[in-house]
Image (cartoon, rainbow, N blue to C red):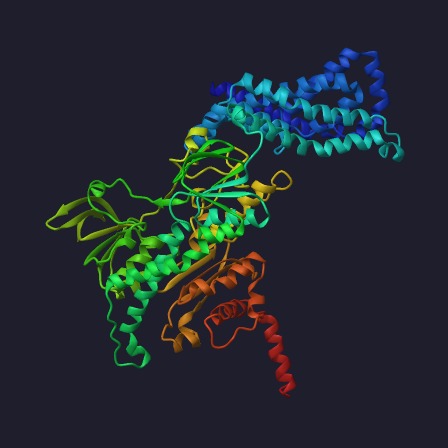
């Protein structure tokens, strides 16, 4: 087998080498054909079969060896043989040549590629095994990639040779007809007037429109395929333009946009309007953080010139305040407000029964609603890992920790991400003895190492026992409390605790409301699979927010909701691709950590060249006056340029300060313009300007400055 492969490889290499050595490509251009057109036509009339056979063999050789010139030969074939016979000859020649290239790729490369990259290609292989014929047909019909590349790449997949042949024959036929038709008109060009003739112009307009029309056709075929089992259930009329499942951030924004453009929209929520953000996430956590930060600042009152400040509080009162804050914000997300905006707010458990219908089980019974488009905004929930014993003991998550009215004496926090870190510090500052366990080597593993160290340093000052690089292995009850057994650096460690908060991440809500019943696809990340337009595999069903990912933030939920709702309402006219180019986030620990774009860790992982500029907030006048002079501004830029690749800020108000860099990245504003912008003195925002100033000093034109120094000495009369 190895010998056969070597012989085949040498033969292909020799043939390709001869093609370029003897410059045979000069015969495969329109200029050569126009020069020889009369002679070729005379030979064809004298030897029609020989001409057709010779042309077919040359075409097979060109496509089989993946040589340049197939497109020109298609046009020439139309000019020589006309539309009918040109199409027949080229259709078979191109398919035979493509299949030869496919077989060569399979014989020479497939085994080695699959051995080396088999794990990474598993998803591709599975998809090709299931629906390889349709994928190949779409690629043939819509020329996104060069045909020769498709031939070679398909040879690496498990698609059958016969399937490859007939799908290629059918899929390339429409494009072949369009090109051959254009070629028939080329034969009639004698001058500029011929180029401007209606027939020629019509042929090239069709050539230009073909990819667009073919793409539309593929979309129509794909939609017909996915909707086929449900066509009998499609309503003749719809009650709503759009139905939204879930009234969290993504669902509220989707419904708001639809109502704003006067669409009839229904918003279905089974529990509480506002979703996780209002009821169990952003709002309650920031309310508790504010209270805990006040307690911590009182303990440091001597730094502000005071002898001492005593804070008398009951934990239950703080948690009641959290609920009051939720109630104060509730009207922003209430049924009354959204009803006033024109949204039909529907209480009940939703179940998707077809691509256009949703069954709602509510207080008034069960009824079915219909809509032209559906938006899934079902959110996410805390993930509780299957650690032995964990499910056998009481455990808290970010959903139910707000029900506490008694401060745990010993609190174990499992997880070192944003939620775990925020609540760890808040409870520690309110008096709990907190142990935080994180499996990764450091807290907040998405941030740069020195950023994590700044947070850990403050945690240590707050009396938190931080155990990083520690993997929880088992939970068990003890006398009146509980025990965690964990593995750290090859040794077992134990932690005694009274309450455990599980904060190791969140998982999308993808079950329990009909997705599995109708066949909405789920991604490898266990989120609803969507394309760049937030569409699922059903073109009229969209998903946004945490249930679709990839980012699980309130602000990104609102961001993706705009694309989902606008595309759902107006996608038949124009669709918008979701833009993830500038995604910011913040962790509201003390110090706060805010970031947008790349950090050093990600830039190195992706192999992106960068420069780093930092400014220490310990130098900032306002920070010194506020007795909060710690932290930094860290900016990544393109080497030698002021274009911002990303920024990280650590310190007080970091979540507010990062806005300037978000705006700059979104609108392509560089550090030079930030430096040239007046910032009020003394403010925290000056830190951004000083970071830009540090970049400017590092890129000062030293040679020009040397000349200026000489000029000024001359001005002073120094010769």
**Camera-side residue: 222 or 109?**
222
Farthest residue toward the left? 479
Judge left or right: residue 687 versus residue 45. Answer: left
**Camera-side residue: 277 or 587?**
277
Judge left or right: residue 677 versus residue 49. Answer: left
How far across and down, in percent of the image, does residue 267 sit? 47, 44
Q: Quadrant of residue 22?
A: top right
How far across and down, in percent of the image, does residue 659 sit? 50, 62
- Tell me if residue 450 can be seen: no
Q: Report the label total.
A: 0
Farthest residue toward the front? 364
**Image quarter in which the C terminus is found:** bottom right
**Camera-side residue: 34 or 224?**
224
How far across and down, in percent of the image, does residue 231 sit? 54, 25
How far across and down, in percent of the image, does residue 127 sit? 48, 28
The image shows residue 224, relative to residue 424, as above or below, that is above
Residue at position x 45%, y 29% from top?
Answer: 518
Residue at position x 47%, y 65% from top?
Answer: 657
Residue at position x 49%, y 68% from top?
Answer: 688
The image shows residue 480, relative to residue 231, as above or below, that is below
The image shows residue 53, relative to residue 680, as above or below, that is above
């Amino acid at each position: 087998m190895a010998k056969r492969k070597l012989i085949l490889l040498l033969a292909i290499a020799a043939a390709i080498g001869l093609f370029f050595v003897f410059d045979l490509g000069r015969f495969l251009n329109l200029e050569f054909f126009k020069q020889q057109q009369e002679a070729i036509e005379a030979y064809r009339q004298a030897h029609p079969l020989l001409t057709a056979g010779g042309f077919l063999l040359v075409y097979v050789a060109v496509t089989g060896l993946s040589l340049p010139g197939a497109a020109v030969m298609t046009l020439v074939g139309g000019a020589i043989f006309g539309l009918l016979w040109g199409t027949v000859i080229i259709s078979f020649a191109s398919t035979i040549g493509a299949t030869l290239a496919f077989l060569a790729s399979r014989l020479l490369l497939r085994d080695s590629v699959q051995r080396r990259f088999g794990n990474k290609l598993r998803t591709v292989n599975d998809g090709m095994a299931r629906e390889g014929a349709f994928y190949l047909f779409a690629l043939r019909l819509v020329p996104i990639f060069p045909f020769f590349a498709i031939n070679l790449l398909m040879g690496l997949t498990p698609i059958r040779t016969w399937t490859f042949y007939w799908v290629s024959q059918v899929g390339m036929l429409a494009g072949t007809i369009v090109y051959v038709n254009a070629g028939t008109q080329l034969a009639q060009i004698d001058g500029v007037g011929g180029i401007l003739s209606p027939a020629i112009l019509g042929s090239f307009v069709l050539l230009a429109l073909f990819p667009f029309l073919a793409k539309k056709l593929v979309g129509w075929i794909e939609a017909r395929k996915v909707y086929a089992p449900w066509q009998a259930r499609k309503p003749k009329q719809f009650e709503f333009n759009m139905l939204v499942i879930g009234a969290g951030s993504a669902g509220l924004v989707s419904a708001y946009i639809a109502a704003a453009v006067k669409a009839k929209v229904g918003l279905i929520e089974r529990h509480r309007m506002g979703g996780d953000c209002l009821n169990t996430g952003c709002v309650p956590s920031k309310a508790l953080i504010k209270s805990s930060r006040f307690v911590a600042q009182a303990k440091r009152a001597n730094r502000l010139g005071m002898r001492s400040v005593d804070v008398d509080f009951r934990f239950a009162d703080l948690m009641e305040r959290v609920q009051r804050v939720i109630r104060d914000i509730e009207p922003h997300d209430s049924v009354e407000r959204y009803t006033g905006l024109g949204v039909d707010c529907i209480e009940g458990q939703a179940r998707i029964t077809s691509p256009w219908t949703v069954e709602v089980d509510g207080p008034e019974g069960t009824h079915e609603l219909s809509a032209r488009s559906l938006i899934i905004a079902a959110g996410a929930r805390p993930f509780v890992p299957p650690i032995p014993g964990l499910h056998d003991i009481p455990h808290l998550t970010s959903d139910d920790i707000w029900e506490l009215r008694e401060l745990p004496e010993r609190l174990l926090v499992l997880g070192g991400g944003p939620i775990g870190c925020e609540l760890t510090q808040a409870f520690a500052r309110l008096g709990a003895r907190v142990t935080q366990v994180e499996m990764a080597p450091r807290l907040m593993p998405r941030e740069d190492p020195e950023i994590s160290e700044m947070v850990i340093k403050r945690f240590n000052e707050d009396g938190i026992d931080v155990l990083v690089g520690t993997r929880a292995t088992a939970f068990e009850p003890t006398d009146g409390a509980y025990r965690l057994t964990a593995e750290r650096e090859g040794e077992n460690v134990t932690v005694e605790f009274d309450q455990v908060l599980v904060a190791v991440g969140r998982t999308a809500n993808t079950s329990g409301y009909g997705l599995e019943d109708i066949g909405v696809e789920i991604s490898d990340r266990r989120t609803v699979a969507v394309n760049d337009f937030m569409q699922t595999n059903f073109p009229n069903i969209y998903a946004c927010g945490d249930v679709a990912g990839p980012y699980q933030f309130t602000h990104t939920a609102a961001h993706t909701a705009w694309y989902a709702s606008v595309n759902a309402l107006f996608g038949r006219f124009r669709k918008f691709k979701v833009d993830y180019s500038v995604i910011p986030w913040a962790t509201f620990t003390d110090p706060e950590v805010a970031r947008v774009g790349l950090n050093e860790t990600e830039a190195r992982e992706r192999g992106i060249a960068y420069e780093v500029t930092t400014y220490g907030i310990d130098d900032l006048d306002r920070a010194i006056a506020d007795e909060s002079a710690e932290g930094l501004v860290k900016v990544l830029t393109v080497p030698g340029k002021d274009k911002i690749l990303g920024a990280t800020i650590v310190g007080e108000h970091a979540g507010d300060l990062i806005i300037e860099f978000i705006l700059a990245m979104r609108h392509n504003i560089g550090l030079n313009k930030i430096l040239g912008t007046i910032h009020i003195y003394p403010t925290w925002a000056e830190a951004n300007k000083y970071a830009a100033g540090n970049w400017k000093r590092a890129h000062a034109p030293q040679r020009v400055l040397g000349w200026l120094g000489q000029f000024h000495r001359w001005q002073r009369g120094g010769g």
